[in-house]
Image (tube, rainbow, N blue to C red):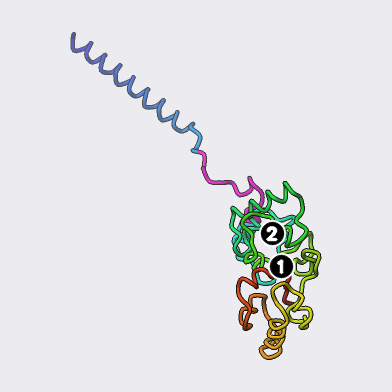
Amino acid sequence: MSPAERRSLTILLALGVAGHLIRAASGASSVPPPVSLGLDPAADGNPLAHRDSARALARPIADTERIDVERATPPELARLPGVGPALAKRIVADRQIHGAFGGIAGLDRVAGIGPAMLRRLVPHLTFAGVAADTLAVGGDPAVDLNRADVAELDALPGIGEARARAIVAFRDSAGPFRQVTDLIRVRGVSQSLIGRLAARLVVR
């Protein structure tokens, strides 16, 4: 190959490489920017509303707050003391299968809810908007520990006249009960007895 031919071949190769570089550069500028993987706050409603809702469902239930068992969703029910996600789902499933609970006695049919839990739940429940502690339970009205006399307390199963007098005497000396569990401070009243009576008692 003569020097002139080698020069011509070199020029052609250089031009070819230059052409490839120019095409590559122009192609890169036309590639669209990568898609952001972040969520668009406007794509799924108001992000502040979602945030506030999530915070509300994660917040422990307040002392005076009540949840309607006949309408609440599992996340709402899970905020109740002692009720986690699994039990909350069972409550809703039972409600869907068997219908409204109607009161504490109806809620007791759900597996995993017993007297001790009912005692904790009563102050925080309503049934179709009616406070649990004002509903009749088993056909009998709830008894207010701060207003009941000896006869009313004596009529409760497992109390008897002696315990009824002890409850009234304790209330007169120590002041009103703040919650049903305060009964444990009365001589002769056991935790198991409080659990059995939880659905019948209220503190106002």
Residue position marked by numbered label 1 in the rendering: 199
39 shown above or below 142: above
Q: What stretch is highlighted in magenta?
A: 35-50
Q: Is residue 165 left or right of residue 187?
A: right
Q: How crowded is mark 2: few (under 14 residues within 10 Å), some or many (20 or more)?
A: some
Three-letter code for the amino acid on which mark 1 is drawn: Ala
Label 1 CA crowd tier, 10 Å (few <14, some 14–19, many 20+)? many
* Closer to us: 161 or 36: 161
Name the secondary structure under disc 1: helix
Helix or strand or loop: what does disc 2 sit on? loop
- Relative to the observer, which residue lies in front, 197 or 133? 197
Disc 2 marks which residue? 108
Check if mark 1's residue and mark 2's residue have beta carbons within 8 Å. yes
Residue at 69 percent of width and 73 percent of height: 158
Location of residue 120 by image quarter: bottom right
Which quadrant of the structure image shows residue 159? bottom right
Residue 85 picture location, percent across and down:
59, 54
Q: How far apart are marks 1 and 2 (CA)?
A: 9 Å
Is residue 48 in the magenta section? yes
Identify which residue is drawn at 44% across, 31% down.
28
Quadrant for the C terminus in the image: bottom right
Picture layout, residue 104 above or below residue 189: above
Percent of width and height locating residue 65: 69, 68
Which residue is painted at 75% across and 69% down in the image?
133
